[in-house]
Image: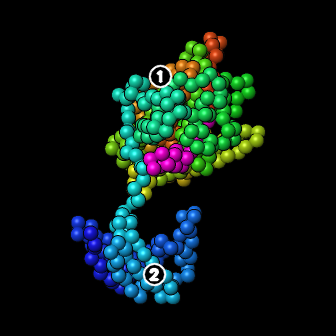
Amino acid sequence: MQPTLTTGAEGLDLVWPDGTAGFFPYIWLRDTDPAGFHPQTGERAFDLTSVPLDVAPESAELAPDALVLTWPGQEAPSRFDLDWIKAHRPGQRRADPADLAPVIWRRDLGAAGIPRVSAEEVLTTEEGLAHWLAETKRYGLSIVTGLADTTEAGMDVARRVGFLRETNFGRTFEVVSKPDPNNLAYTSDALPLHTDLTNQELPPGYQFLHCLANEAEGGGSVFCDGRAVAEDLKAEDPEAFEVLSTVTVPFRFHDAETDIRGRKTVITLDARGEVSEICFNAHLADILDLDPKDMVPFYRAYRRFMELTRDPAYSVSLKLSGGEMVVFDNRRVLHGREAFDPGTGFRHLHGCYVDRGEWDSRLRVLSR
Ligand code: OGA
Ligand code: ZN
């Protein structure tokens, strides 16, 4: 059905018979002219500075299926498909198949509630891959089962998503108790709940930990949904939430080869004000350098957050077995492990990361 068209000084209005209405500024219409995009790459080729900000069409008309605009100094008119322009009217977000509503979880999820999929499904079917990507994104956590007993097996699953994120620990890393560790993960000590590599400019997105052996006494895993902690903190103590979402913490990792430093808030909010990231690692927090007057309020909030991460109300515990791989959003779900006794058996996890952008891209491509 044809809309009605009304032109104004700065833009035009279209109102469709179903009541849908859009206001289309002229500068947006000029910048969005379909002819201004490269025919092969789809990238915008139009140069915005080639027209004045107050550009206006010489004429605006409705053809049966298009809005047709002629512009001063431009021979070919712009043609906008009417269905397309209705779907793309300014003021609303473009639909995104990767924009999945999170399932926020607490203790009641239980180990049995963690989404589980077989490596075979993920590796051999597009439906299995798409289903796993979506579930892992919603929960921020999943377990892939039935992996082959090789260090390549976890990477093969990760590569189904996209490029691996290489870090100073390598493209992949071996979590084993080592004689000269540069990271607490490479000892047999307990690791309290944390997110990895908070010292990086961009901490890695999804983390993959493929369990090759977990024979030692101890060595159980624990996970906690940082979104649940952040949301409950916001309700319980809005001031603490405000501090943790505005005050940046200095983080640092250094060894013989590297000195990698970054600052992050513990809680990051997105443009909609929703919690989009958690960045929490007490081991990597550098000497706190806040203004003295901000110190106690910060410690109060930070310590409360830390207490909540330790509250069993939020945690799900399990012990990984050989052939299982846990996959989680490292910028949302905190992970930790119990101490283990290397004298009682071998423990070996093989890890790698894939960033969130790769994940979302694969979700979108598979939903086409
Ligand atoms: C890590 C880590 C957990 C474990 O390597 O970052 O937290 O279970 N490992 O060893
Ligand atoms: Zn870790």
Image-quadrant location for residue 232: top left
Which quadrant is home to the N terminus? bottom left
Q: Earlier in the sequence, mark 2 or mark 1?
A: 2
Is the CB atom of the residue marked by disc 1 within 8 angstroms of ligand 1's nearest atom?
no
Q: Nearer the viewer, mark 2 or mark 1?
A: 2
Q: What residue is pinned by disc 2?
A: 77
Q: What residue is pinned by disc 1?
A: 318
Is residue 109 in the magenta section? no
Compared across the picture, whether 325 is left or right of 239 comes to right
Residues at marks 2 and 1 touching, judged by CB atoms closer than 8 Å: no
Q: Which residues are magenta?
A: 352-368
- Percent position (x, y) of residue 227? 41, 41
Amino acid on which the number 2 mark rests in the picture: Pro
Label 2: which secondary element: loop
What is the crowding at mark 1: few (fewer than 14 residues within 10 Å), some, or many (at least 20)? some
Q: Is residue 11 visible?
A: yes
- Percent position (x, y) of residue 52? 50, 84
What is the crowding at mark 2: few (fewer than 14 residues within 10 Å), some, or many (at least 20)? some
Residue at 44% across, 40% down: 134
Name, please, the residue furthest toward the right.
Answer: 256
Q: Which mark is residue 295?
A: none
- Percent position (x, y) of residue 255? 73, 38
Residue at 73% across, 43% down: 258
Image-quadrant location for residue 314: top left
Relative to 215, say whether 152 is above or below. below
